[in-house]
Image (spheres, grey):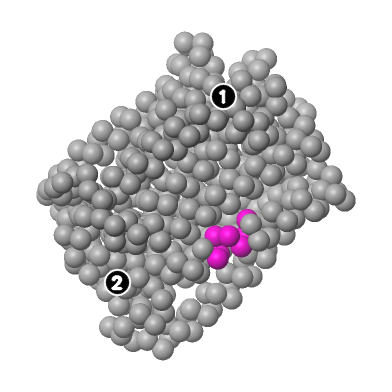
Amino acid sequence: MAEGSAAPLELGTERIGTLLRKFAVPGIIAQTAASLYNMVDSIYIGHISDVGSYAISGLAVTFPLMNISIALGTLVGVGAMTLISILLGQKNYEAAGKVLSNTLTLNVAVGLLFTVVALAFLDPILYFFGASENTIPYARDYMTIILLGNTFTHLLHGFNGIIRSSGHPKTAMGLTLFTVISNAVLDPIFIFGFGMGIKGAALATVICQILALIYTFNFLADKRHFLHFTRPVFQLNGKIAWQSLAIGVGPFLMNIAASLVALFVNQQLRKYGGDLAIGAYGIVNRFTMLFAMVCMGFNQGLQPIAGYNYGARQYKRVREVFWLTAKWEVLVTSLCFLISMFIPEVAVRLFTNDNERVGLASKGLRVMNSGFALVGFGMASGNFFQCLGMVKKSIFLSLSRQLIFLLPLIYTLPLWMQETGVWISFPISDTLNVIVSAILIINIFNKFKRLNDGDDASSLGGAV
């Protein structure tokens, strides 16, 4: 049987462990590949002779702006994924198709608007995000090309998630793997072969995404699938758009918060440690994101299973898939914690052989991830509320770790601890977020215990 031909139906009947393995493993591979996709640029750029130190610092300066772009993409895409999963659980395929077409229109509009605004004010934005005279040429060269391909990026990531949620996780994984492998091949050709440096890394990224998007459009135009484009392909329904954006607000704010964190970290590290400290943070962030992306892969497996079964009012299965996902995510973040504590230099040397930068980044990795072991539970919890359409709880958990806890610490601790205060802000906020997540999860599951399968769960506030 072809992948996905009965996938929406099996979400409500197959064993949870089997389903999570089927949907999470492709997601894990895809997200790990996506993280490696970003790491490849950093690794190649970090080893460019003579300019590697400033180039990788320039790349780190672009993180906040790239996070804003990702945030706008998730604002549209994640809400659409959640709505489609719930509608498939309700067997409302016509409405799911309308959500898909709506997503196309919204992504194009948002992507183009962001590109125009960001390009118009690129230099002031990059200086605000921590660029210096040494690093801005690299940051500007990289972001100009990335921004020109921004709309393609929005569409690819949004539709990739929708393909996965509609019962085609292997197809979604294959598309991501294609972009990673092709990027790894094209990067050295453009960077070194054509002598384009950091511009070559950006151009390789955009080309790979355009090629993957072409296949994605062909896939979603195929009427043999449960979910496909309906005529008119470009349409905008106000009600669907509002529901999608409302659900996507949580991850949108989480990415905006990540952008603010990267901004203020860059500013504080530049103040207390200089350009090389910003480069060290770029390395630490890239490495840690590899493990966070594995957790996001598990979350991708959780999303269609929890969303479908919540829509189908099978609450026992909803609880079961959460706990299984949370367990695996904690194991992943615990592995990151162990590497960071005991062999940080091994991880850092993937990005640079400069001894000074190795020392800075190794220290930062050890301190920053000293509270990372249980972060997987917090990530699973935030995504769980998003899967059920519980917008307020999802938003709160998205904001608590980064805005409520982390940002105040980033600005207060360095007053006493200098550069170390920036790094130590992360484990403190991680610990506080896990505690808050546990309180909310215990509360919602106590309410679930009072529901039998088939009961109306509208009192819980989810999108049923």
Q: Position of residue 119 (x, y in %)?
A: 49, 29
- Secondary structure of residue under mark 1: helix
Q: Is residue 385 left or right of residue 130?
A: left
Query: Does the image show residue 10?
Result: no
Q: Residue at x 53, y 25 (%)?
A: 142
Residue tagged 1: 140
Question: Reading the chain from its start, which is encountered first: label 1 or label 2?
Answer: 1
Q: Position of residue 226 (x, y in %)?
A: 17, 55
The boundaries of the magenta stretch are: 396-402
The answer to whether 347 appears left or right of 419 in the picture is: left
Spatial CA span between label 1 and label 2: 46 Å
Q: Is residue 416 above or below residue 310?
A: above
Tag on residue 264? none
What is the number of callouts on the image?
Answer: 2
Q: Is residue 418 above or below residue 39?
A: below
Q: Amino acid at mark 1?
A: Arg
Q: Few, some or many C-alpha atoms within 10 Å of disc 1 (few <14, some 14-19, many ≥20)?
A: many
Asked whether 216 or 193 is in front, the reply is 216
- Image coordinates of residue 338 in percent, x first then y, are 66, 52
Disc 1 and disc 2 in contact, CB within 8 angstroms: no
Image-quadrant location for residue 149:
top left
**Relative depth, front residue between 164 and 124:** 124
**156 or 376, which lies in front?**
156
Is 352 displayed left or right of 326 in the figure? right
Tell which residue pokes out farthest to the right in this image: 416
Residue at image point 35% right, 74% down? 317
Q: Amino acid at mark 2?
A: Gly
Q: Which mark is residue 311?
A: 2
